[in-house]
C-alpha cells in the first residue's frame, strides 16, 4: 500500500496534464434562398493530454449538433497511448495519421477514412480516426514509420441528407464486408540537401463501397435485366512519393500516388448462392498527383497554387457467372476511386489557388480560394474573414460558391450549386 | 615625449581589435551549453494596442538548435517550431501543426519573414555567420554607462539578407549586444533593437529584447522568464517527435 501511495505521489508530481480546445457555434445558410443548411455541425472540440515521463495519453473529442431535428453527438475522434523513447515514437489506439507533403489534398494519405460532412474543412477534422498501432524510428536524417490497422474503417458519407447535393439517398447495404481487415503502411523519409523526400506503401481496402456482384436475368431477345447490385470493398495497394524543396523564395511540394485496385475474390458458398448471380471482376491502376507552389509576399500573404490530377491508365473488367464461370457481356460501371484524395470525386484535373494572410497583429485572418475544374466547366470560389476582438475570441464569416455547367446537370459542380453558402460563427479557444 | 606618443599609438594599433576580430570574440565568448526559458512577447501597434504571445523555448549550441512551443494565444497552443542551423547548407525549419496532425517543413530561405507577426524576423533570430558579413569597427562609445564596441555589419552581396547593414553596439566587458540599428535594402533605417542581459552561473545571458520597426511604428517587447542554463538538454530533444509534446511547466 505504501509503495502504491509512493508511486502515485511520484506520478502525480512528475506528470503533466494539458488541455486545449475550441467552442465554435456556427451556421451555414444557402446563398440561393437564405435557408439554413440542415447538416450536423461540429461545434466544440476538446483535446486532453496526460504526460508522465516518456509516456503520453491523448484524447481528442468533438461535439456535433444538428438543428433540425435537434440532435447531439459526442465523438471520441482520437484516444491513444504514446511512448517516446530516444529512438522514436510508438503509439497505440484510435489515431488520425497524416502522410504527404502537400497541403489539404494528399493522395498518399490513406491510413484513415474521410468524413464527407467536413470535406471542405482543412486538417485532421475531415478524417475519421482508426484503431492502429504505429511506430516511427528516427535515425540520423532518416525517419522510418510503420502503421498497422486491424480493422477496416469506411468513409462517413452524408447518406440521405437532402441538404448535401452529392449525398446518396440511403445508406447502401454492404453484401460483402471486408474479409481481410488487416491493413499495413510503411513510409521512409529522408533529407537530401535542402529537400525532404518520402516513399510510402499502403496495403488496405477501399474506404467507399463498389459493385462486386449483380443478380441478372437473361432472356432471349431482350436485354439482360439487372435485378440487384451487391456492394463490397476493393483491395487496394498504394505506392507513394512525396517531396518538398525550396527554390529561391518558392516552396515546392509534390505528391504522387499510384493505386492498384481490384475486386476481391469472393468466398461464396455456391450451395447458397442464387443462380442469377454474376460476379464483376475489375482491376484498375490509377495515379493521383498534387503539385504545389507556395510563395509568401513581403506583406506576409501566403499564395499557394495546387494542380491536382487523377488519371486512370489501365482498366480491365469481366462479368462472369458465379456457377459456370462463363464470361458474359454486361456493361461496366464508371470507375470511382475508393482511396486517395477526396477531391478526385469532383474532378480529374483541377487547379486550386489559395491565399491567406494575417493582419492587424494577428487579429484579422483573411483567406481566399478558387478551385477550377480543368476537365469540364466548374468552379468553386471561397473567401473568409476571422477577426479577433479579444484574445482567444474570434468572429468568423465566409462564403463558398459553386458554379457549374447549365448544360450538364450531371456535372458535380452543377450539382453542388445549391450548396453555395455563407457561414457565420464565433470561436472561443481555451 | 614624442617617442612615448609614437610607442603608445603603435601599441594601441597593434593591440586594438578589428571589426572581424570583435565579431569572432562575440561568437566565441563563453556561452551556456543549453538554455530554457518561457518567452513573453508583447506586440504593440501604432495605435498602442497590444497583444501577448507566450512560448516555451529550449536551445543548445548557442541557439543553433532550438525548439519553441507556443502556449498563448490559445488558438496557437500546441503549435511548435524546430530550427537546426547548419554550417554548410541552409537551415532546417519545421512546424508542428496540431490541427493537421502534421510536421511541415518550412523555408529557411525567406529569413525576412516576420516571426509570429512580431518585429523580429527569422533572420533576426538566426546566428550571424562571420564569413557572410563584413565588420567595420567604428569609434567606441558609452551606452548606459557601458563602454561599447561599435561595429558596422554589412552582409556580403551574395548573401540573401533583408538588410543592407547593421550598426551594433557591444558591451566591452560582457561581449553582449546592447543595441542595434538595422537598415533595409534601400539603406533606410528599419529596426531599432535594445538588449538587456543578466549574469547567471558565470555566463552573461540575454533576458530582454525591445524591437521597434521604425517604418511601421510597431514594437515588440520580448522577455525571457524562468531562465535555466546548463540543465543537460540532450541533442535528441531536437527531433520532430518532441514538437508534439509540450514541455513540463
Image (cartoon, coloured by chain):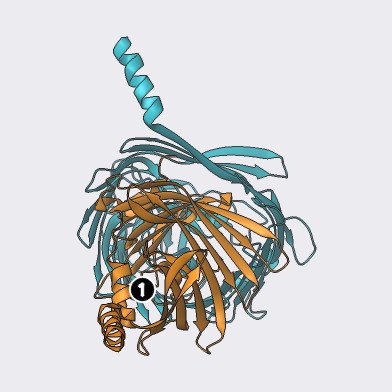
Specify the subunit that label 1 lies on: B
Q: Position of residue A322 (x, y in %)?
A: 30, 54
- Viewed as shown, does residue B110 lie left or right of A418? left
The answer to whether residue A339 is visible is: no
Quarter-wise, where is residue A191 in the image? bottom left
Which of these two is toward me, A4 or A31? A4
Q: Residue furthest front?
A: B1
Question: Quadrant where the C terminus of chain A lies?
Answer: top right
Identify residue for label 1: B128
Which of these two is toward me, A131 or A242? A242
Question: Quadrant where the N terminus of chain A lies?
Answer: top left
- Viewed as shown, does residue B171 lie left or right of A412? left
Q: Position of residue A57 (x, y in %)?
A: 39, 36
Colour displayed for chain A in the image of the structure:
cyan
Quarter-wise, where is residue A166 in the image? bottom right
Determine whether A142 is above or below B90 in the image: above
Q: Position of residue A7 (x, y in %)?
A: 32, 20
Label 1 crowd (10 A; few <14 / some 14-19 / many >=20): some
Which of these two is toward me, B135 or A184? B135
Image point (29%, 14%), residue name: A3
Image point (49%, 54%), residue name: B99
Determine whether A326 is above or below A368 in the image: above
**Helix or strand or loop: what does disc 1 sit on?**
loop
Which of these two is toward me, B240 or B26? B26
Colour displayed for chain B in the image of the structure:
orange
Quarter-wise, where is residue B15 in the image? bottom left
Q: Position of residue B228 (x, y in %)?
A: 38, 46
Image point (41%, 57%), residue name: B102
Amino acid at each position: 500500500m505504501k509503495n502504491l501511495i509512493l508511486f502515485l505521489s511520484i506520478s502525480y508530481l512528475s506528470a503533466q496534464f494539458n488541455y486545449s480546445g475550441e467552442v465554435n457555434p456556427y451556421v451555414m445558410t444557402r446563398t440561393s434562398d437564405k435557408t439554413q443548411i440542415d447538416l450536423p455541425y461540429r461545434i466544440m472540440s476538446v483535446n486532453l493530454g496526460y504526460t508522465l515521463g516518456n509516456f503520453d495519453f491523448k484524447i481528442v473529442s468533438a461535439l456535433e449538433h444538428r438543428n433540425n431535428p435537434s440532435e447531439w453527438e459526442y465523438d471520441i475522434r482520437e484516444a491513444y497511448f504514446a511512448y517516446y523513447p530516444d529512438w522514436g515514437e510508438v503509439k497505440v489506439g484510435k489515431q488520425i495519421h497524416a502522410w504527404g507533403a502537400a497541403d489539404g489534398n494528399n493522395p498518399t494519405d490513406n491510413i484513415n477514412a474521410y468524413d464527407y460532412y467536413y470535406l471542405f474543412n482543412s486538417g485532421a477534422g475531415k478524417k475519421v480516426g482508426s484503431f492502429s498501432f504505429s511506430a516511427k524510428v528516427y535515425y540520423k536524417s532518416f525517419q522510418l514509420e510503420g502503421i498497422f490497422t486491424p480493422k477496416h474503417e469506411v468513409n462517413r458519407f452524408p447518406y440521405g441528407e437532402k441538404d448535401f447535393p452529392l449525398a446518396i439517398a440511403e445508406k447502401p447495404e454492404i453484401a460483402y464486408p471486408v474479409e481481410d481487415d488487416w491493413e499495413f503502411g510503411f513510409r521512409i523519409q529522408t533529407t537530401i540537401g535542402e529537400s525532404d523526400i518520402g516513399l510510402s506503401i499502403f496495403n488496405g481496402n477501399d474506404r467507399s463501397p463498389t459493385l462486386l456482384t449483380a443478380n441478372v436475368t437473361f432472356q432471349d431477345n431482350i436485354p439482360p435485366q439487372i435485378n440487384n447490385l451487391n456492394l463490397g470493398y476493393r483491395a487496394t495497394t498504394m505506392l507513394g512519393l512525396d517531396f518538398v524543396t525550396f527554390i529561391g523564395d518558392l516552396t515546392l511540394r509534390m505528391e504522387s500516388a499510384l493505386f492498384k485496385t481490384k475486386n476481391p475474390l469472393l468466398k461464396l458458398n455456391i450451395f447458397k448462392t442464387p443462380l442469377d448471380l454474376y460476379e464483376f471482376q475489375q482491376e484498375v491502376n490509377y495515379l493521383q498527383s498534387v503539385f504545389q507552389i507556395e510563395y509568401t509576399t513581403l506583406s506576409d500573404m501566403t499564395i499557394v497554387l495546387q494542380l491536382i490530377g487523377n488519371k486512370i491508365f489501365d482498366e480491365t473488367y469481366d462479368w462472369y457467372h458465379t456457377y459456370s464461370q462463363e464470361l458474359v457481356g454486361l456493361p461496366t460501371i464508371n470507375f470511382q476511386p475508393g482511396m486517395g484524395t477526396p477531391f478526385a470525386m469532383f474532378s480529374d484535373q483541377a487547379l486550386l489557388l489559395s491565399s491567406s494572410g494575417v493582419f492587424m497583429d494577428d487579429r484579422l485572418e483573411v483567406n481566399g480560394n478558387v478551385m477550377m475544374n480543368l476537365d469540364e466547366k466548374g468552379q468553386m470560389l471561397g473567401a473568409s474573414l476571422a477577426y479577433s476582438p479579444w484574445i482567444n475570441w474570434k468572429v468568423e464569416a465566409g462564403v463558398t460558391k459553386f458554379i457549374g455547367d447549365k448544360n450538364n446537370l450531371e456535372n458535380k459542380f452543377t450539382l453542388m450549386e445549391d450548396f453555395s453558402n455563407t457561414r457565420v460563427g464565433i470561436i472561443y479557444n481555451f | 615625449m614624442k617617442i612615448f606618443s609614437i610607442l603608445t599609438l603603435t601599441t594601441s594599433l597593434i593591440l586594438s581589435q578589428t571589426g572581424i576580430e570583435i565579431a569572432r570574440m562575440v561568437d566565441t565568448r563563453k556561452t551556456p551549453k543549453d538554455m530554457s526559458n518561457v518567452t513573453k512577447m508583447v506586440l504593440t501597434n501604432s495605435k498602442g494596442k497590444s497583444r501577448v504571445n507566450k512560448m516555451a523555448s529550449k536551445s543548445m549550441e548557442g541557439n543553433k538548435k532550438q525548439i519553441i512551443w507556443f502556449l498563448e494565444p490559445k488558438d496557437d497552443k500546441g503549435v511548435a517550431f524546430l530550427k537546426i542551423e547548419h554550417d554548410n547548407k541552409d537551415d532546417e525549419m519545421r512546424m508542428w501543426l496540431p490541427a493537421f496532425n502534421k510536421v511541415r517543413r518550412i523555408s529557411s530561405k525567406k529569413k525576412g519573414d516576420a516571426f509570429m507577426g512580431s518585429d523580429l524576423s527569422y533572420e533576426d533570430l538566426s546566428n550571424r555567420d562571420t564569413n557572410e558579413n563584413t565588420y567595420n569597427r567604428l569609434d567606441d562609445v558609452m551606452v548606459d554607462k557601458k563602454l561599447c564596441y561599435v561595429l558596422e555589419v554589412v552582409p556580403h552581396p551574395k548573401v540573401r539578407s533583408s538588410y543592407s547593414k547593421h550598426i551594433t553596439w557591444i558591451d566591452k566587458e560582457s561581449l553582449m549586444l546592447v543595441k542595434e540599428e538595422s537598415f533595409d535594402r534601400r539603406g533606410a533605417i528599419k529596426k531599432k533593437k535594445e538588449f538587456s542581459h543578466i549574469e547567471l552561473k558565470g555566463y552573461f545571458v540575454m533576458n530582454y529584447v525591445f524591437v521597434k520597426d521604425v517604418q511601421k511604428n510597431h514594437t515588440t517587447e520580448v522577455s525571457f522568464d524562468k531562465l535555466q542554463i546548463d540543465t543537460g538538454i540532450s541533442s535528441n530533444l531536437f527531433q520532430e517527435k518532441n514538437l508534439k509534446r509540450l514541455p513540463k511547466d
